């Protein structure tokens, strides 16, 4: 039985901090839930940390479905949230409904996440009414990178902070079960967290959110030359992978990798008979003629 939406809501009521991590494949999903992380986000950060794009706008529904399915195969207990990619929910309500339904029906996710506030409130309302749980996402919304011209903290001025507060309230009113707050001042995140009944999950939004989400690659040091300010490195996986690959290549080159202990052998008589038959099997060479 997977973690449920009411269980996540209850964690806020009981003051229990909510950890959420991204995962994009079955093995990582299994490891993350074995670590008792109740919420897995298959984020469209997939585009940047797995697929090699410079931002998330290139990520497609097909990309996301492929990876959500993998995460579902690898997990049994976590509540899996599928991130709706760029342009998959803003062209029309119908398109949003169809795409969100694919994540639930085809891929088996428990919820979808979409970016935006008042501009997507009606979409959130329709999805929730149709039975699709929605996680909102306000503050820095990476799918707006082309408009924003980069990734920077949002909501520092009174006017900008009020916009984000209004967006947060709109998404809750529309029926979202939780809300990601990305890269906003800690004081604003605290005010939003205190004002909403639904859990807030922060990333670069200070310590007072109800939960915290991180891109797993940032925690693992998987991308060796980049760690965002809000992340903490618990491992140096990039260096570990590079070192292991280097050692392997070196051992292959110096013929130290494939030692008899790692090989399987066959009966002497079988290989002798096979050699006897070789001339009838191989293509005739010039000197055989
Ligand atoms: O795509 C993603 O990983 C996200 C998180 C950063 C919240 O949206």
Image (cartoon, rainbow, N blue to C red):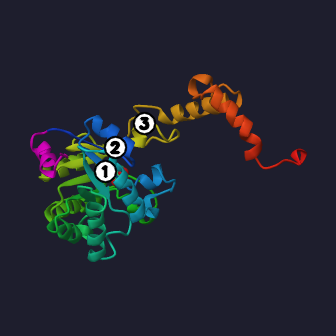
Circles 3 and 1 in contact, beta carbons < 8 Å: no
Q: Is residue 119 above or below residue 18?
A: below
Which dot, 3 or 1, sits closer to the camera?
A: 1
Q: Earlier in the sequence, mark 3 or mark 2?
A: 2
Among the two numbered marks 3 and 1 on one chain, the one whose residue lies closer to the N terminus: 1
**Label 3 secondary element:** helix
CA separation in Å, label 3 and label 2: 14 Å
Residue plotted at (35% across, 58% down): 141
Q: Main secondary structure of the magenta part?
A: helix
The crowd level at tag 3 (other Cα within 10 Å; few <14, some 14-19, many 20+) is some
The boundaries of the magenta stretch are 1-15
Q: At which x and y percent is residue 246?
A: 62, 32
Q: Secondary structure at mark 2?
A: helix
**Magenta region includes residue 14:** yes
Question: Looking at the image, do the residues carrying marks 1 and 2 touch, with CB atoms under 8 Å apart?
Answer: yes
Q: Is residue 68 left or right of residue 201?
A: right
Crowd tier of the residue under label 2, counting other residues whose Cα lies within 10 Å: few below 14, some 14–19, many 20 or above? many
Which residue: 39% across, 56% down? Answer: 44
Say which label, 1 or 2, has the lower sequence index: 2
> Which residue is the site of mark 1?
72
Q: Secondary structure at mark 1?
A: helix
Q: How far apart are the alpha carbons under marks 3 and 1?
A: 22 Å
Please give the name of the residue rendered at 30% of the width and 65% of the height, measured from the top-left corner: 102
- At which x and y percent is residue 127? 20, 67
Please say whether residue 219 is visible from this viewpoint: yes
Give residue 29's mark: 2
Q: In this rendering, does residue 159 appear at all?
A: no
Q: Is residue 167 above or below residue 198?
A: below
The location of residue 37, given as percent across then percent down, is 26, 39
Q: Is residue 208 on the magenta stretch?
A: no
Q: Which residue, given by chain and number where applicable, does mark 3 sit on?
A: 220
């Amino acid at each position: 039985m997977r973690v449920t939406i009411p269980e996540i809501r209850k964690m806020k009521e009981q003051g229990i901090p909510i950890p959420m991590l991204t995962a994009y494949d079955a093995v990582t999903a299994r490891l993350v839930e074995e670590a008792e992380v109740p919420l897995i986000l298959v984020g469209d950060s997939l585009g940047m940390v797995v697929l090699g794009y410079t931002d998330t706008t290139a990520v497609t529904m097909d990309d996301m479905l492929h990876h959500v399915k993998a995460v579902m195969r690898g997990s049994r207990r976590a509540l899996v949230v599928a991130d709706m990619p760029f342009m998959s929910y803003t062209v029309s309500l119908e398109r949003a409904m169809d795409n969100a339904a694919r994540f639930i029906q085809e891929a088996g996710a428990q919820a979808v996440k979409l970016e935006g506030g008042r501009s997507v409130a009606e979409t959130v309302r329709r999805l929730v009414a149709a039975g699709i749980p929605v996680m909102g996402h306000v503050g820095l919304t990476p799918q707006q990178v082309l408009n924003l011209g980069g990734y920077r903290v949002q909501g520092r001025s009174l006017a900008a902070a009020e916009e984000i507060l209004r967006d947060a309230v709109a998404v809750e009113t529309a029926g979202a079960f939780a809300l990601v707050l990305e890269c906003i001042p800690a004081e604003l995140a605290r005010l939003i967290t205190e004002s909403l009944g639904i859990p807030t999950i922060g990333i670069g939004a200070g310590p007072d959110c109800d939960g915290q989400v991180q891109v797993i690659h940032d925690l693992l040091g998987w991308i060796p030359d980049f760690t965002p300010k809000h992340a903490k490195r618990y491992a140096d996986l990039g260096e570990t992978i590079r070192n292991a690959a280097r050692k392997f290549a070196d051992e292959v080159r110096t013929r130290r990798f494939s030692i008899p202990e790692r090989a399987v052998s066959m009966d002497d008589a079988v290989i002798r008979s096979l050699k006897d038959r070789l001339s009838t099997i191989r293509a005739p060479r010039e000197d055989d003629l």
